[in-house]
Image (cartoon, grey):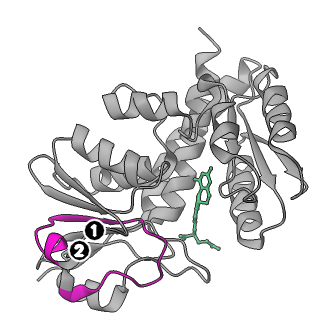
Amino acid sequence: MNKLILDGKAVAQEIKSNLKKRVESLTEKGIVPCLATILVGDNPSSETYVRMKGNACEKIGIKSIRIQLPKDIQTEELIDAIQELNNDDAVHGILLQHPVPSHIDERKAFEAINLKKDVDGVTSAGYGQTALGFGEYPSCTPAAILNILKYYQITIEGKQAVVVGRSPILGKPVSALLLNENATVTTCHSKTANLPDILKQADIVVAAIGKPKFIQGDWLKDGCIVLDAGYNKGNIGDVDYESCYNVASAITPVPGGVGPVTIATLLKHTVDSAEKTLT
Ligand SMILES: Nc1nc(=O)c2c([nH]1)NC[C@@H]1CN(c3ccc(C(=O)N[C@@H](CCC(=O)O)C(=O)O)cc3)C=[N+]21
């Protein structure tokens, strides 16, 4: 069987090269697209991701503002910082890096982000719009997964899609996006009985559970398409790559799969948001 390695770097490159001209033309009009990222605490892998996002912005001419807050701040102080960015006309997108320390009410903080600047799709309004099929900014990893399928012209309509994971910014919205594309979607999670039996039916598998190498090749249907959204410590995906590679017809690697497209999608949403200030 032909194997296709879904190359996230190529997809990301295409998205970013289309953005360059748009950023230039905005800048000529005096609007420099700007993404603000907020990191609470000093989790090293979160720091890496936030740094990667900032660097990717600057490479294509998007301004990046990095807000670093101490790990012992309270929810209200975090919300104050978000409000300040909401009120700053020079900021077009706000990303609060997940997870925040456990004493902070992350949901409450996400909800404080102005919908117009919610380029990361974390607010309930953003999610609701995505689920109903008219959202401007679906969460970036779910949108990245759809971007990969589109780039490789993989048909979604009529397929059985199984999403493993139901988190607010990954499993739930990716299930919604696949449903909007007319897949038949099953969302599985930690309490799902007989996960391997359900996965055996899947034409498209999205792994979004946060357990390293969890999904095994012998759970999958021959020729299925595997999208690994896992980002466990050490760049380990949620899929046992070797065994899944053998049965899948197409699979995303980690690294070099969903991750780079997530970042490119975030940049695209930021530029979309900046363009909206023109009209
Ligand atoms: N509010 C919020 N929005 C997010 O979108 C969000 C978040 N919080 N918290 C953490 C996760 C994780 N995430 C990744 C993005 C890029 C890579 C990525 O590009 N990884 C590279 C490898 C990383 C490396 O080179 O070190 C790759 O897969 O090739 C990974 C993970 C976004 N997330």
Against 200, is 170 above or below?
above
Q: Secondary structure at mark 1?
A: loop
Q: Position of residue 59 (x, y in %)?
A: 71, 51
**Residue where numbered disc 1 is placed:** 192
Q: How far apart, in angstroms, are the residues tagged by discs 1 and 2?
A: 6 Å
Magenta region: 197-218
Which quadrant, please, contains the N terminus?
bottom left
State the image coordinates of residue 87 (x, y, percent, origin top left): 80, 20
Query: For the point 68% across and 63% down, which residue is it?
Result: 49
Within 10 angstroms of label 2, few (less than 14), some, or many (20 or more) residues?
some
Judge left or right: residue 185 versus residue 93.
left
Neighbor class of circle 1 (other Cα within 10 Å; few <14, some 14-19, many 20+) is few
The total of numbered circles placed on residues is: 2
Q: Are marks 1 and 2 in contact (CB under 8 Å)?
A: yes
Q: Which residue in the protein does label 2 denote?
A: 195
Question: Residue 190 is drawn in which quadrant?
Answer: bottom left
| Residue behind label 1 places its C-beta within 8 angstroms of ligand 1 | no
- Dividing the picture into quadrants, the one containing residue 79 is top right
Say whether residue 87 is left or right of residue 189. Answer: right
